[in-house]
Image (spheres, grey):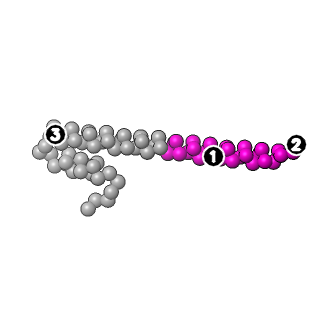
Amino acid sequence: MPGGAGVLRSLAGSLSDSSTRFDEKQKTKCLAAAAQEATKRVEFHTALVKEHPQDVGFRVMLRDALRGDEPPE
């Protein structure tokens, strides 16, 4: 079949593009889930500090949650 090699190359390229788009979607979903989890953690610790303002440990936990993955100062 003439031109069959071109069709196969085109198909391979298309499949590769689809795979890359799928990986990007998965990465985006994962990042969104991580951001949502971090937000929930901050909200939880904020509520603890509001409920128990005298407890220094809860304030430290909130500070660490707000800092995220940054190393301590």
Image quadrant occupied by the N terminus: top right
Q: Residue at x 57, y 42 (%)?
A: 22
- Kindly identify which numbered label has been placed on residue 50: 3
Q: Give whichever of discs 1 and 2 has the lower sequence position.
A: 2
Name the residue carrying label 1.
17
Q: Position of residue 18 (x, y in %)?
A: 62, 42
Q: Give whichever of discs 3 and 2 has the lower sequence position.
A: 2
- Would you call the spot at circle 2 few (<14 residues within 10 Å), some (14-19), or many (20 or more)? few
Q: Quadrant of residue 69?
A: bottom left
- Kindly identify which numbered label has been placed on residue 1: 2
Q: Position of residue 50 (x, y in %)?
A: 16, 39
Q: Residue at x 24, y 42 (%)?
A: 45
Is 35 situated left or right of 19 in this image?
Answer: left
Q: Position of residue 6 (x, y in %)?
A: 78, 48
Q: Position of residue 72 (x, y in %)?
A: 28, 59
- Would you call the spot at circle 3 few (<14 residues within 10 Å), some (14-19), or many (20 or more)? few
Q: CA distance from mark 3 to mark 2?
A: 74 Å
Task: Give the label, 1 or 3, closer to the camera.
Answer: 1
Q: Residue at x 63, y 46 (%)?
A: 17
Q: Which residues are magenta?
A: 1-27
Q: Nearer the viewer, residue 25 or 55?
A: 25
Q: CA distance from mark 1 to mark 3?
A: 49 Å
